[in-house]
Image: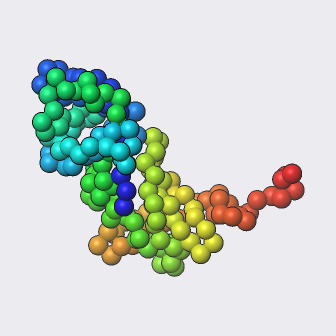
Amino acid sequence: MGYRNIGTISRTHGTAGAMILTQCPDASLSLQSGTPVLIGFSANFAKPYILTSCESYKQSLIIMLKGVTMSNIDQLKDNGVFIDEKELLRDNEQYYISDLLECQALDEQGNLLGRITDVWIMPANDVWVLTTKDGDIPLPVIDDVILSTDIEKKQIVIRLIDGLTDLLPGGDQDESNLD
């Protein structure tokens, strides 16, 4: 597991010590009060804080941190906010990113295709990385591809729509067009 950047502290909001995070890969995050976060220019060189509140605001987030007041927010501006992946839960989701990792990916007939080894948080839709015996396939998290998710059984049923297997090394590329 690692840490994910959830945004950059850009400015204050109000007078109670709230901060606006911009450059948020996902402004629909739902984080609980008491969640530990790291603040710094990278997760490796960051200081720990405790989140006291987090809410969506336009295309960004508004957060408050335990012990941080208006007088010391200036020291935090332009720093990234990082959170352990296992703490990530977005609105309308019932599971964490860490719950998806190592899930078996099955096709519609129940054949094992591989396992989910990474999750990319992207602006349009997330991408789950399916590791197969032939290589990695980035799966867009859309209804046409992800058919069902059973976290308790650690199984995901997927449909490999046209073009996804072409992304494998040596996939169905038309070599006559390659120079």
Foreground: 57 or 76? 76
**For residue 40, above or below residue 88:** above
The structure residue drawn at horizontal position 45% and vertical position 60%, both measured from the top left corner, is: 118
On the image, which quarter does residue 6 sit in? top left
Q: Position of residue 85 (x, y in %)?
A: 33, 55
Q: Is residue 100 visible?
A: yes
Q: Position of residue 12 (x, y in %)?
A: 23, 23
On the image, which quarter does residue 86 sit in? bottom left
The structure residue drawn at horizontal position 13% and vertical position 39%, both measured from the top left corner, is: 66
**For residue 41, above or below residue 151:** above
User: Which quadrant, please, contains the N terminus?
Assistant: bottom left
Q: Is residue 44 left or right of residue 141?
A: left
The structure residue drawn at horizontal position 61% and vertical position 68%, both measured from the top left corner, is: 135
The structure residue drawn at horizontal position 29% and vertical position 73%, both measured from the top left corner, is: 152
Q: Position of residue 167 (x, y in %)?
A: 65, 59
On the image, which quarter does residue 161 sit in? bottom right
